[in-house]
Amino acid sequence: MRKFFYGWVIAAASGLGIGCGVSVFIPSTLGLLVGPLGKEMGWTPQALFLCPLFAAIATVFVATPVGALVDKYGVRRMIAFGFLAQAAITASFYFLGTDIAGLYARYALFAILGTATTAVAFTRLVSAWFERDRGLALGIALAGTGVGGAIWSLLAQHFILRHGWRVAFLWDSGVMLLVLCVLLAVVRETPKSMGLSVDGSAISATPNALRPSAGMTLGEASRTRAYWFMIVAFVIVVSSVYAVMLHLVPMLRQRGVSAQTAAAIQASLWMAVVFGRVVTGWLMDRIFAPYVAAAFLVPSAVGMGLLATGATGGQAVVAAMMVGAAAGAEIDVVAYLCGRYFGLRHYGRIYGSLFAVAALGTAIGPALAAQLLPLAGGYMGVLWFEAALVVVGFILFLQFPRFDSQRSIEQMQRGRAEVVDSRG
């Protein structure tokens, strides 16, 4: 019988960390705040949906440096700093004043100080533990986005209804600190630190297994066709999917759905993210990953179409889950492809640059949708627009180049060695 591999604990712990990090906390709670903050502060939905844009702009500048710090100092130190900062910023919402600039500043700080709580750190950790089953392990870790989104949707709404939105943020902060304690107790940087090897076997499971010391630099990766395909495809898909995700609660409330029911439907969307990420991870170990991503975009477009036709009740739950499954697939794929195309040596820096672009998409999409609402005559026109973007993403994923990571990485390394020899 095969011995249990501690790497699966690392994957599960990474899921817990990602699920409680800023990249999940922001989109799963912002829609819940539109009503309370609009009532007390007089802020419009259009103004509130600019919050993720401030976080995304900050992410563009900090994600790559944070990835480099993760490569240099390790995951444990960076996630400790990130969660302490995130908890402090969250607690500071208790003192939020009537100047909306204070709200925007907090969301920018979430990104500046909390990016180490995201997939930038945790996918680097999981990739160091797995080679043969890396897709499934990443799927389990990134499924934390869906679990965390569902839990935050229900838990934050419960705190708001029971204590009011100000005190609710204090409870949210306490949850983050508790999660940090769990992570520090179980997370280990590499299999070697526990006397293990990648995948838990004495010898690497595959002859071409990528070593942590092997990999392209960010400059080398940015000169490949795969890198730019990833940037264009993911910014299009992420912006459209997250536009629907963040607008789901306000849209349902406009259709007469109660606040608690709307939060429950949003939670169902996040649970579908879990399905999308785990299934995607398992499939990517067996099928060319961009084709897997393209397949998950089909139900997403259909789900957006259902919502555009005015779905409520059970139909809205099904439609939301179809959209959520695509969100689960796409972020999973970029983490997997980053390691396969470019290796692990500078994974944090390269993935950080891709994460920054994806973060920009998560902000541009909801903000653009809010601005389009009056022009499109309501959510119907906006949803058909987002569905069209998903179709464009589907076509792009079918154009991705095949990859032979070890061969391309070794070619890059030989090129660097030849340059050094010629200078010597």
Image: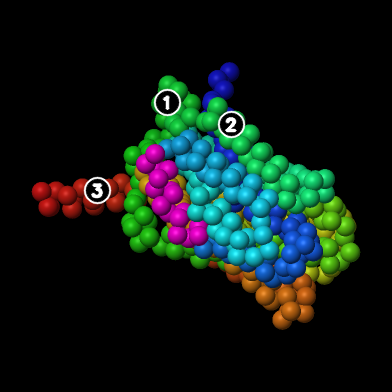
Q: Which residues are magenta?
A: 58-73
Task: Give the residue drawn at x 69%, y 47%.
Answer: 169
Spot occupied by residue 16 in the image (x, y as percentages of width and height)? 62, 38
Residue, disc 2 = 181
- For disc 3, the marked residue is 414
Type of residue at label 3?
Answer: Arg
Task: Name which residue lies at 68% across and 50% down.
Answer: 94
Query: 358 or 291, which lies in front?
Result: 358
Q: Which residue is mark 1?
A: 193
How much space separates mark 1 and mark 3, taking CA atoms? 29 Å
Percent x, y for residue 305?
76, 67
The nearer-to-camera label among 2 and 1 is 2
Q: Earlier in the sequence, mark 3 or mark 2?
A: 2
Q: Badge 1, how many Cα within 10 Å: few under 14, some, many 20+?
A: few
Does the CB distance between marks 2 and 1 fall below 8 Å?
A: no
Mark 2 residue element? helix
Q: In the displayed orientation, state which residue is furthest to the left.
A: 424
Left or right of 217? Residue 196 is: right
Residue that protrudes farthest toward the top in the picture? 1
Going by the image, does 291 lie left or right of 373?
A: left
Which amino acid type is marked by label 1?
Ser
> Chief secondary structure of the magenta span?
helix
Amino acid marked by disc 2? Cys
413 vs 41: above or below: above
For label 1, the SS is helix
The answer to the question of whether label 3 and label 2 lie on touching residues, with beta carbons closer than 8 A, is no
Is residue 1 highlighted in magenta? no
- Looking at this view, is 132 or 248 the one in front? 248
Is 286 left or right of 93, judged from the image as shown? left
